[in-house]
Image: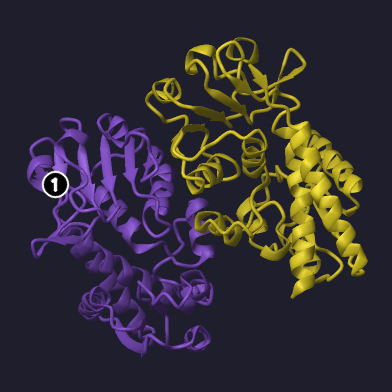
Chain colours: A yellow, B purple
Amino acid sequence: MKELKGKMVAEELMTQTAQTVDDLKNINCLPTLAIVRVGEDTSSISYENAAIKTMQKVGITVESHLFDEDIESEDVMTAIESLNQDPSIHGILVMQPLPDSLSRNDIARCIDPAKDIDGLTPENLGKVVENDTNALYPSTPRAVMELLDYYGIEVEGKDVCVIGSSPVVGKPLSIMLLNAEATVTNLHIKSKDVKKYTKEADIVISATGSIELVTADYIREGAVVVDVGFGYKDGKPVGDVKFDEVSKVASAITPVPGGIGSITTAVLAEQVSRAAWILNSN
Amino acid sequence: MKELKGKMVAEELMTQTAQTVDDLKNINCLPTLAIVRVGEDTSSISYENAAIKTMQKVGITVESHLFDEDIESEDVMTAIESLNQDPSIHGILVMQPLPDSLSRNDIARCIDPAKDIDGLTPENLGKVVENDTNALYPSTPRAVMELLDYYGIEVEGKDVCVIGSSPVVGKPLSIMLLNAEATVTNLHIKSKDVKKYTKEADIVISATGSIELVTADYIREGAVVVDVGFGYKDGKPVGDVKFDEVSKVASAITPVPGGIGSITTAVLAEQVSRAAWILNSN
């Protein structure tokens, strides 16, 4: 069984990104990310800190724009609008989850698609459907594609199951896998029989947030298993996959932590540098 | 075996649309569609004529903008841009296929998403991913959803196979079915074993353009079969499905012609009226 660690994938992405950032600095462009956070959600703050660390490593400047959780929706939109207009800002990252009082879709639609480095806007999501690989994609599904690519795991023609159909991960990931010409089945809470599909799949990717949902009996001997889940059990971080038993059946599996989660901020950094490059070319 | 004819589905949509058109005329808005066609593709012209007939029936005015097939891409874009700006135009339909010299994506991206009544723009495709049901969707996959809805064919939790993964039909249809909480498998030319999936499915939808690809041995006894294909065999119109034999196995099946094809122009008309309504409310 091969453990598909995210660290090397992230490092390769970051090396390329640091090079792009250097090239940009040579033409007097200082790639800069604006982080917008509303409220004090703990997991949001720890993800923000991880993102800041990655940006610093590759030479991207970060500006944080923090708002109280009782802020009006319009005030957040006005702040985003001014970041859209600001030529010194190349990427905008709105931390999730937003407080219940704010609409994720309304906020997403304010972001200039050219600066939308987490692929939240309908325009960028639509470019995933179009298979426009120059577009800015949602970071987590793109992290999965980067991992499969790094480890040389062929997807074309393979039977792939995606468990979870959220607009942030499951749905765009299914489309990206379809663009890569996999046979994709998307499974979710309403599916009659998840195991019937996963037991026959070459690759199973779980993105439900349901802790240890995927047990050994879900997986065919020799399949590849990718765990996009993240949660806690008895105070320890765990994913969607029951690692101890599934790792005995799978030929390759991502750990949690240290798998997909460690790649997403590197994807964000790559997308900031690419957005800066494109904004500078126009 | 029940034959799922498109005519009644189209008529119901057109009755609703004619009402919306009347309401618009009462507030002095004359809903108007601009058709843009480049070249003289025969199937494109016959589809255009069908669309014009449907628009006339519901009271929508049609303007045709025709161009020689050797026109420069920029000239088409300039024409579309002036339609975008024209307040008397509420919908823009660019006929497919375009000549090889023009890029479908470049042309699509010129259309104002608010007038994009065939869901070609990335913004509208992205709203399909977001499950924003107020958006303007690609007409053919929406026609499939309207047919299933009209005949009371439940999709939630059902095992559904979509054969074909084009950005115009297969991919957006898979997303719409996923939004309706079906378990969706998208199959295509690179799939190892299409039949393995289709033989177990509750609903099989074929959108490949490969004549009579789907034979009786693809279908489980009692399944629902939807044929989005259209072609000719011995001079007669046929679909993706070998109707004579599949109709003996399926519990319900769409005919070709007279199935999905007869609903798409009604969907376009509904979307012109809706676009006009929204443009008038702003």
Mark 1 — on which chain does it sit?
B
Q: Residue at x 34, y 63 (%)?
A: B139
Tell me the quarter of the image containing the N terminus of chain B. Answer: top left
Q: Position of residue B83 (x, y in %)?
A: 47, 86
Q: Name which residue type carries label 1.
A: Lys
Q: Residues within 10 Å of mark 1 (few under 14, many from 20)?
A: some
Q: Position of residue A118 (x, y in %)?
A: 69, 51
Q: Position of residue B39 (x, y in %)?
A: 33, 84
> From the viewer's perspective, is residue A135 above or below residue A266?
below
User: Which residue corresponds to mark 1?
Assistant: B242
Q: Position of residue B103 (x, y in %)?
A: 48, 73
Q: Nearer the viewer, residue A205 or A119?
A: A205
| Badge 1 element | loop
> From the viewer's perspective, is residue A26 above or below residue B36?
above
Q: Residue at x 47, y 17 (%)?
A: A220
Q: Nearer the viewer, residue B27 or A109?
A: A109
> Which of the 4 image quarters holds residue A127?
bottom right
Q: Residue at x 14, y 37 (%)?
A: B216
